[in-house]
Image (cartoon, rainbow, N blue to C red):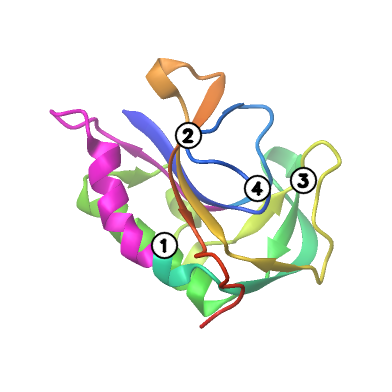
Amino acid sequence: MRNMILVAFVEAVADGMVFPRSDWPLHITLLRFDVEPSEDNDVAAHLSELVTAPAMGALGAELTVGPDARFGHQGSIPVSLVEHHPVLQGLHEELFDAVASVGGRAATPRYVMENYRPHISHHDGKRPQPGDAVVLDQIALVDMAPEGNHTIRRILKLWRLPAGQTSEG
């Protein structure tokens, strides 16, 4: 199985960027999933085609950071919740459908669809503050173990807000 994730980066990133698994740029997880590699080993390219329309349609949505919370085992992961937004929820659901259409399955099935809880994990003192505005301007497909290397992550595809467009509409 190939482990991948779709995220909305809050910090600036670049297409093809590689970073250590312990040093993620701040992001909102949209959907983490596993998928069987295809015979032509191009499942990422096929998935990118399916995700392009929903990703481009969601870019520009203005989100608001909500209160802090704690996720994970015994609340060990500090996060900032992201307030509900119909565009973000719709994007999550469309991505779930796209992943399912290529035979993928959610890595955390109990936190998808109506149980989706968008958040930004705090990292190395970096975190948003409650009430901060966040524009959905970078959505990415990330390989969680490129070439089988579980110590790094690689951005496979990056969808960006078109130049000059700064908000919904």
Query: Which mark lies nearer to you, 2 or 3?
Result: 2
Relative to 30, say whether 75 is above or below.
Answer: above
* For residue 32, side relative to residue 117 (left or right): left
Q: Which residue is label 3 attached to? A: 122
Q: Who comes first in sequence, dot 3 or dot 4?
A: 4
At x 49%, y 40%, the residue is 15
Q: CA distance from mark 4 to mark 1?
A: 17 Å
Q: Secondary structure at mark 3?
A: loop
Q: Which mark is residue 12?
A: 4
Task: Look at label 1 and name its amino acid.
Answer: Ala
Q: CA distance from mark 1 to mark 2?
A: 17 Å
What is the crowding at mark 4: few (fewer than 14 residues within 10 Å), some, or many (at least 20)?
A: few
Task: Look at label 4 and name its amino acid.
Answer: Ala
Can you give x and y, in whole percent of width and height, for residue 153 in the image? 52, 29
* For residue 79, side relative to residue 162 (left or right): right
Task: Look at label 3 and name its amino acid.
Answer: His
Query: Which mark lies nearer to you, 1 or 2?
Result: 2
Can you give x and y, in whole percent of width and height, for residue 21 in the image? 61, 27
At x 82%, y 36%, the residue is 124
Q: CA distance from mark 2 to mark 3?
A: 23 Å
> Badges 3 and 1: C-beta atoms under 8 Å apart?
no
Task: Look at label 2 and name its amino acid.
Answer: Gly
Q: Who comes first in sequence, dot 3 or dot 1?
A: 1
What is the crowding at mark 2: few (fewer than 14 residues within 10 Å), some, or many (at least 20)?
A: few
What is the crowding at mark 1: few (fewer than 14 residues within 10 Å), some, or many (at least 20)?
A: many
